[in-house]
Amino acid sequence: MTLLDDLQFLIAKYHIKPRISIGQCFCIDPFLLRRMVTYSSVTEKDVVLEIGAGFGFLTRLLTDVAKDVITIELDPKLVKAIKEILRDKENIRIIQGNFLNIHLPNFTKIVSNPPYSISSPLILRLFRLNFQCAVLTLQKEFVQKLIAQKGNKTYGSLSVIASYSASIKKLENVSRESFYPHPNVDSTIILVKPQKPLFNVGDKRFFFKMVRRFFTNRNKKLQNAIKFFIRNEFKITNDAIKKLIKEFPYLDSKVYDLTPEEFGIISYKLYSIFKETKNTVAE
Ligand code: SAH
């Protein structure tokens, strides 16, 4: 049993031409959607956030168990459609907009098949928010990057930032056949639980930014990555940089060879210098 017939009916009725470029691949496996709701353990106490409502198949299931559902959908045509499709539901708030730049109301959990086109900025935004857990279906390769450990070739800034910010559990792999139109990648469902910081980084935003900058050249020696970062971000002379750099550990290690905790130590040190010199770091 799939939802393909229902979906094709709705696509025709509302004259929607699915655009894969903005992640418009709709889940047609009703059992998969049910499992996502089960994984999230949503109850009538929860306010659930959904990113990308599509035609509201997952949204409807969520309204059955949650206190309230807030769903954000970019496409005005889809917003119009789901307002009609879900008109029998009272515990739903439909917001038209881009998840990446709208103001978010409070919520307790996230359950979503978000558009893959915004995976990185989406996950970085989530790591700055407060919530109990998120059940997300994401591109399989993206999840591999998210959970990679040092030594793995997919280990990068996302892995470091994720390991600092949350515990992430792989729940199941999902075939591209579960979506229509089929995306050209497979997916993985994950459970994300934000965690208290495991180590001190000085400042979270600063840490995220530093790690991303360092990994723009993962094969660089740490000392060069630090110099480059300071030169670009701090108003400081080259002589001062030379003096400062001596105080840092792991100078001869390659960027890809540092653990998240080691990046934390570097960030903590850099941030204190940044504060002392009262520099401004651009976003
Ligand atoms: N949850 C649905 C739809 C998944 S497709 C399902 O399971 O079938 C992803 C949806 O996200 C599409 O409807 C697309 O229009 C929407 N979308 C794309 N970019 C978005 C953004 N930046 N913010 C919010 N929604 C977005």
Image (cartoon, helix red, strand yellow):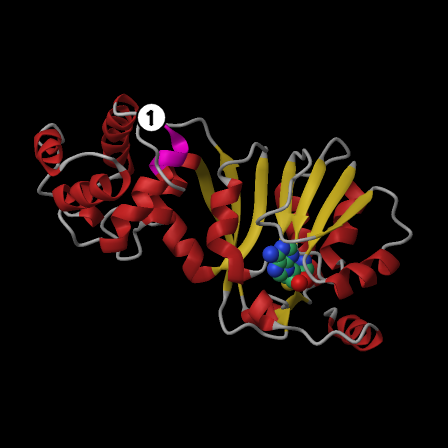
Query: The residue tagged with tag 1: helix, strand or loop?
Result: loop
Quadrant in which residue 70 is drawn: top right
Please say if 41 is above or below 25: above
Which of the four quarters of the rendered structure image does ligand 1 lie in? bottom right
Q: Name the residue furthest right.
A: 88
Neighbour tally class for label 1: few under 14, some 14-19, many 20 plus, Cα within 10 Å: some
Quadrant in which residue 48 is drawn: top right
Residue at (35% x, 36% y) in the render:
281
Residue at (59% x, 65% y) in the render:
23
Please say if 219 is above or below 250: below
Please say if 148 is above or below 163: below
Q: Quadrant of the N terminus?
A: bottom right
Q: Quadrant of the C terminus?
A: top left
Percent from the top left, x then y, of residue 278?
30, 25
Name the one closer to the observer, 73 or 113.
73
Mark yes or no: residue 233 visible: yes
Q: Name the residue furthest top.
A: 276
Percent from the top left, x then y, of residue 116?
53, 61
Indicate whether residue 18 is drawn in magenta: no
Percent from the top left, x then y, of residue 75?
70, 62
Residue at (79% x, 45% y) in the render:
93
Which region of the structure is painted magenta?
201-207
In the drawing, does residue 214 fall left or right of residue 166?
left
Name the one closer to the observer, 69 or 97.
97
Percent from the top left, x then y, of residue 150?
25, 46
For label 1, the residue is 202
- Name the amino acid type tagged 1: Gly
